[in-house]
C-alpha cells in the first residue's frame, strides 16, 4: 500500500523546526540483564518456541509529491523496484474521493502486494500500462526526478523535480504512523533511510495534471532554517511488518545439533545458553535487498517451554535497522499459569525527529500461548491500539 498513508503528518505546530537524529542509547537502555535459573522448573530441551514473525515489502526508492487545486488528485507517489537486476516503476495517484489508482508496467511489482492492498483498500484500482517514463536520481546537488504517464482516462500526468543545493544532506526517520487502522494487522515499520524533503530554494519543480499546471504544496513551516515543498523521498526505504496477527498452531524449533544461531521461517535467532536452557537474545530478518531489521532483548527471552508456573518476567527490547541501533524500543511482559503463557510487547521509546505525540506508544501486542503437548501448541496473537 502507499507509504503516504503511513506518514501521518509533516504539518507541524512549530516554526523553524530543527530535524534531529536522536537515537535511543541501545546498550544503556538494554543493560546487561540475565535470567535467574529460578524462572525454570521444567527440564531443559534442545528446542525453543518463538511467537514472532517478520515480513518485508522491498522498495528500492520512493518519492511522494503533494499538489493543489486539481479536481481529481492531490498526490503522486513514485516507487521504484529492483527485480532481477532490472528496475520497474509503480505509481500511485491519490484521489480526492479517497480512492487510489495504481499504475505499473510489470506484474512483478504487485505480485506479493495486490492482495494486501485489496484487503485493506477496497477503493484501489490496478492499471497496467505499456510504458511509464520516469527518472529518479540523486547526486551532490540533490534530487533529480521526472515522471510521465497517461492515466486510465487517457490523460497525461507529469512532474519534474530538480534540486540545486550543493552538498545536499539526507537523514533518516522512522515514519510516524498514527493514521492507520484502529485495529492493526501488524506493527508497521517504515524506516525512511537516506530521506529528504524537497528544498524550495533553487529547485526546479512543476506538476502537470491533464494539461494544467498545479502548484506543488509548500510546507507551512521552516525546518533547519529552510523552506520545503510537501514532497519527500527516500533512497533506501526499509519496510517491515512485525508480528502479523495470527491464530493457530506453532511448532517448537528443534536445535539439532545444538547451536546458538538458527534460522526458521525467514527469521534468524541468536541464542544464549543459560546453563542448559536456550534463550532468545536477538531475532533478525532481511528483505530482498538484504536490509536487516532486528530486535534485541534484555534479558534474553526465556525458554517458554520450560518456564515455571505462576511466574512473571519483565524485560526490554530495542530495534536495530541496518547498523542503526536504538531506532525504537520498549518492554515485554511474560506470565505463565499452568500450561498457558501470556506474552505482551509495549513499544515505549522511538526515534522521532519531529515534535509531537509518540505514535508507537499506541501499539500493544498481546499473545496467548496454550501448550497442550510438545506437538500441540496453539497461539492467538494480535495488536491493539491504546491511548498514548
Image: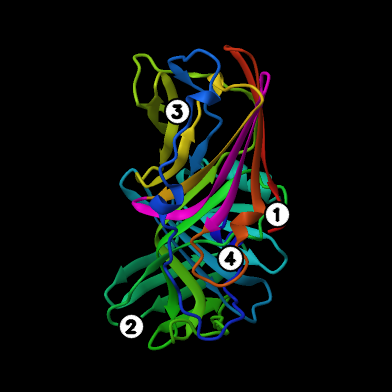
Q: Nearer the viewer, residue 353 or 196?
A: 353
Q: Position of residue 70 (x, y in %)?
A: 64, 78
Q: CA distance from mark 4 to mark 3?
A: 59 Å
Which residue was labeled with disc 2? 164
Which residue, given by chain and number where applicable, does mark 1 sit on? 123
- Distance Cα–Cα, label 3 vs label 1: 45 Å
Density class for disc 3 (Cα within 10 Å; few <14, some 14-19, many ≥20) is many
- Cα distance in 3D space between marks 1 and 2: 38 Å
Is tag 1's residue or tag 2's residue first in the polypeptide sequence?
Answer: 1
Label 2, label 4: how many angstroms apart (C-alpha)? 33 Å
Task: Tell me the residue that label 4 is attached to.
Answer: 154
Earlier along the polypeptide chain: callout 2 or callout 4?
A: 4
The magenta segment is 322-349
Residue ID at (36%, 50%): 322
Dot 3: what SS? Answer: strand
- What secondary structure is marked by label 4? loop
Which marked residue is nearer to the observer: mark 1 or mark 2? 2
Q: Nearer the viewer, mark 2 or mark 3?
A: 3
| Residue 279, numbered label | 3
Q: Residues within 10 Å of mark 1 (few under 14, many from 20)?
A: few
Report the magenta stretch's main SS: strand
Assess disc 4: are there few (<14), some (14-19) or many (≥20) residues with their C-alpha within 10 Å of its C-alpha: few
Q: CA distance from mark 1 to mark 4?
A: 20 Å
User: Is residue 5 in view from this perspective?
Assistant: yes
Amino acid at each position: 500500500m502507499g507509504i503516504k498513508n503511513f506518514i501521518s503528518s509533516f504539518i507541524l505546530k512549530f516554526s523553524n523546526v530543527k530535524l534531529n537524529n536522536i537515537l535511543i542509547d541501545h546498550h544503556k537502555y538494554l543493560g546487561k540483564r540475565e535470567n535467574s535459573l529460578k524462572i525454570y522448573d521444567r527440564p531443559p530441551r534442545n528446542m525453543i518456541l518463538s511467537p514472532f514473525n517478520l515480513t518485508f515489502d522491498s522498495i528500492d526508492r520512493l518519492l511522494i509529491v503533494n499538489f493543489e487545486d486539481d479536481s481529481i488528485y492531490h498526490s503522486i507517489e513514485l516507487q521504484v523496484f529492483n527485480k532481477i537486476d532490472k528496475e520497474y516503476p509503480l505509481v500511485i495517484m491519490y484521489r480526492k474521493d479517497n480512492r487510489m489508482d495504481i499504475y505499473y508496467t510489470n506484474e512483478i511489482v504487485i505480485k506479493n502486494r495486490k492482495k494486501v492492498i485489496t484487503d485493506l483498500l477496497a477503493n484501489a484500482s490496478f492499471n497496467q500500462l505499456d510504458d511509464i517514463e520516469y527518472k529518479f536520481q540523486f547526486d551532490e546537488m540533490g534530487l533529480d526526478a521526472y515522471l510521465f504517464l497517461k492515466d486510465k482516462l487517457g490523460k497525461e500526468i507529469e512532474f519534474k523535480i530538480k534540486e540545486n543545493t550543493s552538498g545536499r544532506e539526507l537523514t533518516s526517520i522512522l515514519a510516524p504512523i498514527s493514521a492507520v487502522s484502529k485495529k492493526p494487522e501488524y506493527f508497521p515499520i517504515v524506516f525512511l533511510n537516506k530521506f529528504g524533503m524537497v528544498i524550495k530554494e533553487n529547485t526546479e519543480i512543476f506538476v502537470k495534471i491533464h494539461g494544467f499546471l498545479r502548484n506543488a504544496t509548500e510546507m507551512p513551516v521552516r525546518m533547519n532554517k529552510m523552506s520545503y515543498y510537501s514532497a519527500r523521498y527516500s533512497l533506501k526505504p526499509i519496510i517491515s511488518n512485525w508480528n502479523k496477527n495470527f491464530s493457530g498452531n506453532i511448532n517448537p524449533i528443534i536445535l539439532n545439533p545444538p547451536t546458538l544461531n538458527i534460522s526458521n521461517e525467514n527469521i534468524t535467532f541468536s541464542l544464549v545458553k543459560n546453563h542448559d536452557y536456550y534463550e532468545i537474545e536477538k531475532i533478525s530478518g532481511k528483505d530482498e535487498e538484504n536490509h536487516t531489521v532486528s530486535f534485541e532483548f534484555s534479558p534474553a527471552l526465556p525458554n517458554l517451554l520450560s518456564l515455571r508456573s505462576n511466574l512473571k518476567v519483565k524485560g526490554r527490547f530495542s530495534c536495530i535497522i541496518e547498523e542503526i541501533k536504538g531506532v525504537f524500543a520498549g518492554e515485554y511482559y511474560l506470565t505463565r499459569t499452568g500450561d498457558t503463557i501470556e506474552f505482551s510487547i509495549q513499544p515505549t521509546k522511538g526515534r522521532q525527529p519531529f515534535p509531537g505525540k509518540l505514535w508507537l506508544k499506541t501499539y500493544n501486542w498481546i499473545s496467548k500461548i496454550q501448550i497442550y503437548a510438545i506437538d500441540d501448541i496453539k497461539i492467538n496473537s494480535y495488536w491493539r491500539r491504546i491511548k498514548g
